[in-house]
Amino acid sequence: MIDLRSDTVTKPTSKMREAMLTAPLGDDVYKEDPTVIQLEELAAETLGKEAALFVTSGTQGNQIAVLTHCVRGNEVILEKDSHIFYYEGGAISAFAGVQTRTLPSFKGAMDPREVQAALRGEDIHEPETGLICLENTHNRAGGAIVPVENMREIYQIANETNIPLHLDGARLFNAAVALNVSVKEFTKYTSTVQICLSKGLGAPVGSIIAGSHEFIMKARKWRKRLGGGLRQAGVLAAPGIIALTEMVDRLAIDHEHAQYLSNEMMNIPKLKVVNAVDTNIILVDISDTRMSSTTYLEKLKEKGVLAVAFGPSVVRLTTHFDLTKEQLEKAIVAMAKI
């Protein structure tokens, strides 16, 4: 089966599996796991932050950030299709007791003037703005790269008003590789950042949140409260070290594969690529086939290809390192036959 559903379906490399077997271990709740410590120090340095914390998932990392930054009754400003708002089960209201204020965007980038206008806090009838959240790359915008300049402008607004800014950077390394810049060019315009190790970087489990020493100290307690305090967690951290040191540059191959798919689909009648393919995600409008996305995906599966629905008439294809060029060619043939 050719799996284009997500870059989360990747399997750990043989080197990652070997590292899991041989990793030095300790009790991470006691801060005694040397492999976790190595990963966290590496991540903090890579992301340009004082400290980092290994967490079980990107969602948990984002939730810990909101819980650490906010108090109950705060309002969080974020983009209307952002992962934190769209795909995390309403967790920031369920756990942190905060409400969301969503703003529209262009390719995932909110207008800084609209962010400025949305800030609240003095009127007793209104909630205080406790946090601004960005997402880069932006999933529902088709893996779009939010420009560094846009982040800088919003971060300046956040600083001037003493409001923290958290970046959901689940696929941030995709943005950095696509623009051929250091990931620090993005993270320097954040108070805190979350990055996933288990998407394009290929680790089987885990994410990182990074920020100041004070933030990470508080975040560690929230991780414990959420049941994320693990014991001999080095078996999971070991592949994360390989992900950060050996799997970043090869993301360029995934981007090339996504461009290939996009270009080839332009030659298939009734299929329209509707996003500018910045990184490894392609959004395809299939409405001219007069099929629903559900029906189309069923027919695609019958031909040995998996994808996901992104609406009633849009499907998403995502490239990753477990896919070969030959498999992509077969996927194109299958779509053309449908």
Image (cartoon, rainbow, N blue to C red):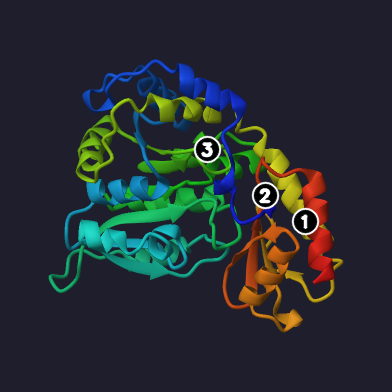
| Residue 236 placement (x, y as % from top left) | 42, 30
Above or below, 125 relative to 150: below
- Of residue 288 and residue 189, the one placed in the foreground of this image is 288
Judging by the rendered image, the residue that carries numbered circle 1 is: 261
The reply, left or right, for residue 309 in relation to residue 80 is right
Residue 274 seen in the figure? no
- Of residue 183 and residue 336, the one placed in the foreground of this image is 336
Judging by the rendered image, the residue that carries numbered circle 2 is: 319
**In the image, which disc is placed on residue 37?**
none
| Residue 92 placement (x, y as % from top left) | 28, 59
Above or below, 202 relative to 305: above
The reply, left or right, for residue 112 in relation to residue 13 is left
Q: Are marks 2 and 1 in contact (CB under 8 Å)?
A: yes
Task: Name the residue type under label 3.
Answer: Glu
Q: Earlier in the sequence, mark 1 or mark 3?
A: 3
How many C-alpha atoms fall within 10 Å of the one at disc 1: few (<14), some, or many (≥20)?
Answer: many
- Could you tell me which residue is drawn at 51 percent across and 53 percent down? 150
How many C-alpha atoms fall within 10 Å of the one at disc 3: few (<14), some, or many (≥20)?
Answer: some
